[in-house]
Image: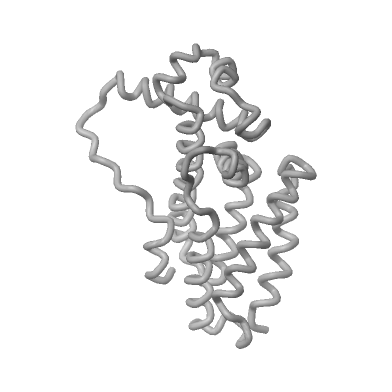
Amino acid sequence: MPEPQAIVFAPPKTPVRRGSDPKQERSARTRQRVLIGAAELFTERGFRQTSVKDVADRVEMTKGAVYFHYPTKEALAVAIVEEHYARWPKLLDEVAREELAPLETAARMLDRAAVAFQDDVIVQAGARLQIERPQIDVELPTPYVDWVSLLESLLTSAQEAGELRADVVPGRAARSLVSAFFGSQHVSDVLSGRADVVGRWRDLSDLLFRAMRTE
């Protein structure tokens, strides 16, 4: 894959661990359990309709125990959105190892993202929380821009490799792909709870990539 993609979806640097700590590992497992429970509720009900007590009840803990790990409901929302975005660098690494051509890499990234939206509650909750940003009194990352950047980089490389039709402008095509992808997963969410998001995106993807690809 082309070099510019390395700066897109760059994961945060993590400190090097120097041996296991059972207490820290147990705390990390508990935090993840709380995060999953909150993600399930935010996906089902939304931010405003979910309380910290709801989360505590879902994971069978006390409110105090939840507050110990996440001091506010907003902190839970931020943590889920950050986990949502942390999925994409890992996915990019996995697809990069397949060593596909640029246009096929773009298609594979979006196909794999569709699977994540169908199966991964963290991804689902992060998407809903981003839609509900005006209701959440905390700053969240700006959605979609990293996806546009990644796809524009891939489409530019595809253009250089002769994979795109001459009239395709990579930046415009990238914005269109992002709008189509996230629009289709939202429609799928509304109509079927994302049960058909993979098939719905496959149909749309076939049309879009066929329109961009050289004969």
Circle count: 0
At which x and y percent is residue 102? 51, 71
Q: Identify which residue is drawn at 69% across, 74% down.
A: 210
Instruction: Confirm whether residue 202 shows in the render.
Output: yes
Q: Identify which residue is drawn at 51% across, 28% down.
A: 73
**Residue 30 horizontal side relative to residue 175, left or right:** left
At which x and y percent is residue 22? 30, 20
Instruction: Confirm whether residue 116 shows in the render.
Output: no
Q: Quadrant of the N terminus?
A: bottom left
User: Hey, which residue is sitting farthest left in the picture?
Assistant: 18
User: Hey, which residue is sitting farthest right in the picture?
Assistant: 191
Q: Identify which residue is drawn at 54% across, 17% down.
A: 56
At which x and y percent is residue 159? 53, 81
The foreground one among 98 and 198 is: 198
Vertical placement of residue 124 versus 148, above or below: above
The foreground one among 38 and 63 is: 63
